[in-house]
């Protein structure tokens, strides 16, 4: 193997170059058996073998807008979660902030078992509970001078723009918007914006593919969007179909109830408190966010709820209109025949779901299972 000391890129013997600077080599040794892995456009990822680290994954955040912040969030999230035993993340073995490189323990991902949602929810609660109770969330997302010392930002929920887009969609579908719905949605966004007394360490994208199902339990990876906030906003992923992910699924109600009970039990055991807030609020928050219909690179570029009136598009296991229909039905069911703060929104969602099916009768339910054998 040859080493470029100036750039810190190791290669040779036909192996792809991996950014591994002098500091990492001094601590962990020189990487061998390097191979490039599939990854998102925002990062480059390699598998390697280290003499003092064993099998590892080397991840570099690609230069571009927000790269320093994403690196800082990932390092912070992994370090906070890394204190847990049994672990819920791979061990963070080394970092190189100058090159935005992380070196992680490599763990083997197997096919998820039946009713994997219960183990997933339990692991997610333990991850959420890892946030130190005495550390408040940061109030901004500006990168610190030392990216590895940057605090995690507060989770950011839907806003007035999302409300307006959702109500415009409802009227375009021909639904009569109940008089109290705008006020319900305003109050909803304020509730979602509150930081709970016991903040959770939020993963930011706890989706199929970012949950590694190992022989020793579930390990979460890819913490580039980590933040501090209310854990129910991620527990809601199971019901609303993983809103930041290509892999949408709709588990049966008994399994969802079992998973949610497991989450609450694990949270209580870890923190001695009950989760704050309402799961219905979290689900409704994801419903009205148009950016929860597209992959990360497209978020913030257009009004996606307006776009789906003109076209449908496929992202992963479902189309945008399938995702919308599923979420409308979820929120309608959750508040049906209940005296909640979202009662009229629930009626509107039921009306909108019926109109979506009338307008686009070819729509089918989202898949009940995640693809096999992976992710």
Image (cartoon, helix red, strand yellow):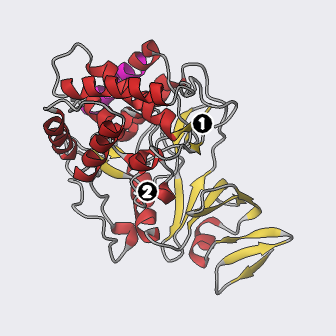
Query: In the image, what residue occupies the spot 66% across and 30% down?
Result: 111
Few, some or many C-alpha atoms within 10 Å of disc 1 (few <14, some 14-19, many ≥20)?
some
Instruction: Give percent across and percent down for residue 71.
Output: 46, 65
Lower sequence index among marks 1 and 2: 2
On whether residue 179 falls in the magenta region, the answer is no
- Picture coordinates of residue 309, whole percent (x, y): 44, 43
| Residue 261 visible, this orientation | yes
Mark 2 crowdedness (10 Å alpha carbons): few <14, some 14-19, many ≥20: some
Find residue 313 and report its image quarter: top right
Q: Which numbered dot is residue 317?
A: 1
Can you give x and y, in whole percent of width and height, for residue 32 in the image? 76, 64
Residue at 15% of width from left, 18% of height from top? 339
Question: Which residue shows up at 45% across the image and 50% down it?
Answer: 307
Instruction: Report the front residue among 153 and 126.
Output: 153
Magenta stretch in the rendered image: 258-271
Judged left or right of residue 200, residue 114 is right
The CA span between labels 1 and 2 is 19 Å
Q: Report helix, strand or loop for mark 2.
A: loop
């Amino acid at each position: 193997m040859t080493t470029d000391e100036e750039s810190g890129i190791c290669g040779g013997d036909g192996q792809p170059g991996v950014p591994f600077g002098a500091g990492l080599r001094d601590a962990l040794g020189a990487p061998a058996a390097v191979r490039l892995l599939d990854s998102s456009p925002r990062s480059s990822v390699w598998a390697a073998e280290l003499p003092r680290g064993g099998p590892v994954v080397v991840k570099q955040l690609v230069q571009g807008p927000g790269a320093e912040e994403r690196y800082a969030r990932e390092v912070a999230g992994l370090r906070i979660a890394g204190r847990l035993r049994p672990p819920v993340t791979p061990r963070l073995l080394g970092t190189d902030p100058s090159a935005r490189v992380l070196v992680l323990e490599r763990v083997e991902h197997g096919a998820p078992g039946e009713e994997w949602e219960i183990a997933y929810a339990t692991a997610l609660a333990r991850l959420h509970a890892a946030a130190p109770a005495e550390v408040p969330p940061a109030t901004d997302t500006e990168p610190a001078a030392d990216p590895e010392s940057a605090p995690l930002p507060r989770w950011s929920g839907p806003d007035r723009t999302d409300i307006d887009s959702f109500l415009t969609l409802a009227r375009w579908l021909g639904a009569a918007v109940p008089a109290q719905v705008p006020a319900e949605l305003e109050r909803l966004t304020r509730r979602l914006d509150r930081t709970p007394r016991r903040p959770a360490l939020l993963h930011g994208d706890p989706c199929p593919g970012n949950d590694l199902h190992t022989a020793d339990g579930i390990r979460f990876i890819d913490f580039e969007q980590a933040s501090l906030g209310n854990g129910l906003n991620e527990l809601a992923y199971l019901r609303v179909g993983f809103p930041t992910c290509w892999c949408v699924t709709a588990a049966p109600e008994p399994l969802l109830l079992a998973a949610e009970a497991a989450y609450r039990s694990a949270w209580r055991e870890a923190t001695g408190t009950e989760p704050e807030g309402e799961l219905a609020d979290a689900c409704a928050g994801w419903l009205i966010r148009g950016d929860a219909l597209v992959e990360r690179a497209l978020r913030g570029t257009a009004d996606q709820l307006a776009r789906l009136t003109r076209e449908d598009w496929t992202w992963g296991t479902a189309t945008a209109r399938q995702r919308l229909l599923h979420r409308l039905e979820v929120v309608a069911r959750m508040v049906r025949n209940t005296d909640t703060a979202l009662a009229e929104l629930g009626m509107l969602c039921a009306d909108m779901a019926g109109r979506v099916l009338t307008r686009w009768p070819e729509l089918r339910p989202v898949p009940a299972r995640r693809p096999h054998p992976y992710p």
